[in-house]
Image (spheres, rainbow, N blue to C red):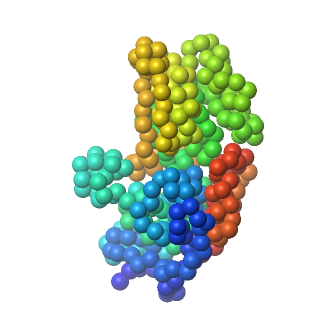
Amino acid sequence: MAIEVNRRYLFRMKAVRLLQIGKPLQNADVPTPEIGPHDVLIRVAAAGICHSDAHYRAGISKIDTLPITPGHEIAGIVEKVGDAVTNVAPGDRVCIHYLVRCGSCDFCRRGLEQFCQTVRMIGKHRDGGYAEFVKAPARNAFALPDEISFEVGAIMMCSSATSFHALNKARLKSGESVAIFGFGGLGFSALQLARALGCGNVYVVDINPAKLALAKKLGANPIDAKAGDPVAQIEEATGGKGVDVSLELVGSARTMRQAVQCLAPLGRAALVGLTAESMSLSPYTELINKEAEIIGVSDHLASELPTLLEFARSGKLHFPAEALRIVDLDAGPIDAALDALQDSIDHVRTVIRSDG
């Protein structure tokens, strides 16, 4: 029999669900998930609203089965554990790695679970955190230190984790310069994580004055893309050299090309943003002659999360209250937050706070 926090069995719960592509989300009353021996049931305390969720709703990123409960940035309290679970216990504060993998294929054995042949993403392929409860394999639950709020713990599971993976893929070295294209949830994390890794000058490219002001406050050199070609601005700021590493976090062919064009010799451009657009480059001048690299970045790795959580626990990664917007677990405000992501919002991330 599964162990639980108390004897108050909750057979049904509130969830906010995607019923039809291109249509608003809907409030729903659904059964509380049943867990298996290797699973945990999490009482959701906070769930981040990611731009990917807007892509799922719009059909830009295909969802195979509907209805679905979105939400892949999740933190909460363990409500119940399966018989075989030993790494967490009821009452533990946790955050959830959203990639559910088989654990036995070649990619899983190499720690590259995003390429597992049977990988399922929480909030896309199976029900996610826009609900009072969510179930996940116990190995996907990571202890959330008391120093980190549930709201921050949730958004770290995508925006921060993906930025950290991008910096790792780009092999950022101490003292190297960085250009960050897009200063939303990923860019906000990327700036702080680059600092934590000992980078040199950081250039943040955006069009939103409030975000550029925040980037400057955090020690970056703001590059206003509305004021002129950001590549030319970065070249001027670096004395014509360019940057060692660039991160493209917008999801636009235009900014992807700019992320490549601003590279110094031996520079690495890590492309994170999603787009269906094609990108054209001049191979000789923009890649071959510089020995520059373009690196694709997909999701992140469970093995990276302990280091990421320690950065946050120690204060090297933080999200001040003014950077977040809090909404209730209700379809109306959640849909409005997804709509707002089509524009350049002033805050960094919207988070659903559940009173479960």
Depth check, front residue: 307 or 184: 184
- Horizontally, is 102 left or right of 240 in the view? left
Is 45 in front, or is 105?
A: 105
* Side of 352 where 128 appears, left or right: left
Does residue 186 lie above or below 13 as drawn? above
Q: Quadrant of residue 88?
A: bottom left
Can residue 178 be seen here? no
Seen at 47% across and 35% down, the residue is: 278
State whether residue 261 is above or below residue 113: above
Q: Is residue 353 above or below residue 161?
A: below
Residue 256 placement (x, y as % from top left): 53, 32
Which quadrant is the C terminus positioned in? Answer: bottom right
Q: Nearer the viewer, residue 128 or 46?
A: 128
Q: Position of residue 283 (x, y in %)?
A: 42, 19
The answer to which quarter of the image holds residue 200 is top right
The residue located at (50%, 38%) in the rendering is 277
| Quadrant where the image shows the N terminus | bottom left
Viewer can see residue 68: yes
x%, y% of residue 114? 37, 50
Q: Position of residue 38 (x, y in %)?
A: 34, 70
Total residue callouts: 0
Residue at horizontal 48 percent and vertical 81 percent from the top: 31
